[in-house]
């Protein structure tokens, strides 16, 4: 979802204030959860077993903002821990993959990544 935002005009320079970061991450979180829900609905209509794989998850925003902002984003005035647990509960498994570039950074660049 963040890539969609960045390729459609959002710039890192736009995210220079807490409120801007919150608005960005709120949009990303909302888009991610809607996308996942849409995939789940489509999979359910096939009446066949299905596995949904997402390259990002609803908790990704926590890595891109400080803890206090993350608490504001998902707390919504309620207990933060319960809100975070409910996001974790969306997933049966989480896989953390390491890039092939780890240890070989000199072979990789960002020159072809507009985001």
Image (cartoon, rainbow, N blue to C red):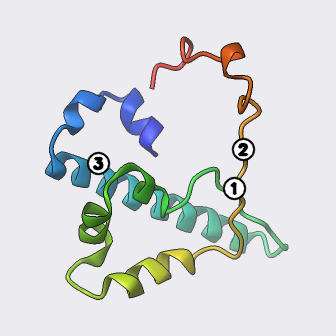
From the image, tell me which residue sits under label 1.
Answer: 96
Residue at 48% from the left image edge and 57% from the top image edge: 32
What is the spatial separation of the Cα atoms under label 3 and label 2, in whole angstroms? 26 Å
- Outermost front residue: 103
Residue at 70% from the left image edge and 76% from the top image edge: 92
Q: Is residue 32 above or below residue 73?
A: above
Q: Nearer the viewer, residue 8 or 75?
A: 75
Left or right of 100 in this view: 2: left
Residue 111, by quadrant, is top right
| Label 2–label 1 contact, CB within 8 A | yes
Residue 51: percent from the left, percent from the top?
Answer: 78, 66
Q: Which mark is residue 26?
A: none
Which secondary structure, mark 1? loop
What is the spatial separation of the Cα atoms under label 2 and label 1, in whole angstroms? 7 Å
Q: Mark 2: few, some, or many residues within 10 Å (few <14, many ≥20)?
A: few
From the image, tell me which residue sits under label 3.
Answer: 24
Q: Nearer the viewer, residue 98 or 87?
A: 98
Which secondary structure, mark 3? helix
Which secondary structure, mark 2? loop
Q: Mark 1: few, some, or many residues within 10 Å (few <14, many ≥20)?
A: few
Residue 55: percent from the left, percent from the top?
Answer: 64, 50
From the image, tell me which residue sits under label 2.
Answer: 98
Residue 69, by quadrant, is bottom left
* Mark 3 / mark 1, whichever is N-terminal: 3
Q: Is residue 74 above or below residue 7?
A: below
For the question of whether residue 31 can be seen, the reply is no
* Mark 3 / mark 2, whichever is N-terminal: 3
- Outermost right residue: 48
Q: Mark 3: few, some, or many residues within 10 Å (few <14, many ≥20)?
A: some
What is the spatial separation of the Cα atoms under label 3 and label 1, in whole angstroms? 24 Å
Residue at 25% from the left image edge and 65% from the top image edge: 68
Quarter of the image containing the C terminus?
Answer: top left
């Amino acid at each position: 979802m963040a890539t969609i935002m960045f390729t459609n005009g959002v710039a890192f320079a736009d995210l220079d204030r807490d409120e801007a970061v919150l608005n960005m991450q709120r949009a990303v979180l909302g888009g991610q959860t809607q996308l996942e829900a849409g995939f789940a609905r489509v999979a359910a209509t096939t009446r066949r077993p299905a596995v949904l794989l997402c390259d990002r998850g609803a908790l990704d925003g926590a890595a891109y903002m400080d803890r206090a902002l993350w608490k504001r984003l998902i707390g919504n005035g309620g207990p933060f821990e319960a809100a975070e647990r409910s996001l974790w509960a969306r997933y049966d498994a989480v896989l953390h993959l390491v890039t092939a570039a780890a240890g070989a950074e000199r072979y990789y660049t960002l020159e072809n990544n507009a985001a």
